[in-house]
Image (tube, rainbow, N blue to C red):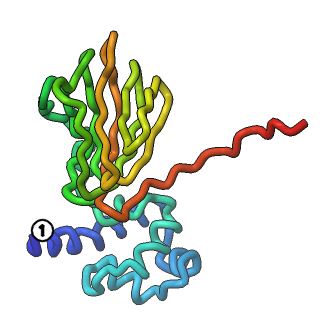
């Protein structure tokens, strides 16, 4: 890895020189644009001066190119998440995040009347946010018995006894975000229009 970094840094000087020649700019003109001395620019291009962020940022602005282009940063990997479905008690969970720890996102697909069995409420550490994409979801939360429909959201501390299930008749799809205890989601919404006239 260190060897790759050294190779990438060694290539910055020739890249800067080529970019300057393509633009037909002299070292003196570039020095006026960036505030970097001619001698420093010359040493950067020859490789005798190590490139730093303080030197590369004004050069990127002067050339109007992204900083990545000056250092030939590797391309970002494929950002798509390819979820592997997990099926438990008839409910399909599609993980939408790959990062361990922190908030985890899942899409849940609940066929009618799942999960089956007793509707015993459970507790555990964490904080949960549920958004119903389609169908309806029954949420038992402490003393509350709620039915959520498409577009509705529930947010709760999972230390409160709770259970969710699909009462039917159709399939229910939900987006579920689960975070460690103390990590709440911050939702911004415009205030509802006042009923006072």
Query: Would residue 197 be found to the left or right of residue 134 on screen?
Result: right
Residue pictured at 41% horizontal, 58% vertical: 184
Residue pictured at 20% horizontal, 68% vertical: 8
Coordinates of residue 191 in the picture (x, y in percent): 70, 45
Q: How many marks?
A: 1
Coordinates of residue 67 in the picture (x, y in percent): 40, 64
Classify mark 1: residues with Cα within 10 Å, few (<14), some (14-19) or many (20+).
few
Query: Would residue 165 be found to the left or right of residue 117 on screen?
Result: right
Please tell me which residue lies in front, 51 or 136. Answer: 136
Q: As displayed, is residue 89 above or below residue 102?
A: above
Q: As displayed, is residue 69 above or below residue 94?
A: below
Look at the numbered disc 1 and give the secondary structure of its residue. helix
Residue 40: quarter of image: bottom left
Name the image quarter holding the N terminus. Answer: bottom left
Q: As displayed, is residue 127 above or below residue 40?
A: above
Please tell me which residue lies in front, 109 or 11. Answer: 109
Coordinates of residue 107 in the picture (x, y in percent): 29, 33
Name the image quarter holding the C terminus. Answer: top right
Coordinates of residue 71 in the picture (x, y in percent): 30, 66
Residue pictured at 46% horizontal, 24% vertical: 149
> Which residue reaches farthest top?
169
Q: As displayed, is residue 192 above or below residue 147?
A: below
Please tell me which residue lies in front, 18 or 70. Answer: 70
> Which residue reaches farthest right?
197
Residue pictured at 22% horizontal, 39% vertical: 95
Residue placed under numbered mark 1 in the picture: 4
Query: Would residue 12 be found to the left or right of residue 62 on screen?
Result: left
């Amino acid at each position: 890895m260190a060897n790759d970094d050294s190779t990438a840094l060694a290539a910055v000087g020739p890249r800067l020189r080529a970019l300057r020649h393509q633009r037909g700019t002299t070292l003196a003109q570039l020095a006026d644009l960036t505030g970097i001395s001619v001698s420093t620019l010359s040493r950067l291009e020859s490789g005798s001066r190590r490139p730093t962020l303080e030197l590369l940022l004004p050069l990127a602005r002067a050339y109007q190119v992204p900083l990545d282009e000056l250092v030939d940063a590797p391309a970002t990997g494929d950002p798509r998440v390819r979820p592997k479905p997990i099926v438990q008690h008839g409910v399909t969970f599609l993980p939408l995040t790959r990062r361990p720890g922190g908030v985890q996102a899942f899409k849940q697909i609940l066929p009618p009347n799942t999960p089956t069995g007793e509707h015993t409420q459970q507790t555990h550490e964490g904080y949960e946010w549920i958004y119903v994409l389609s169908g309806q979801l029954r949420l038992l939360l402490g003393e509350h018995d709620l039915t959520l429909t498409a577009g509705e959201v529930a947010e709760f501390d999972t230390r409160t006894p709770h259970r969710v299930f699909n009462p039917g008749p159709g399939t229910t799809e939900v987006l579920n975000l689960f975070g460690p205890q103390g990590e709440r989601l911050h939702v911004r919404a415009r205030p509802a229009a006042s009923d006072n006239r």
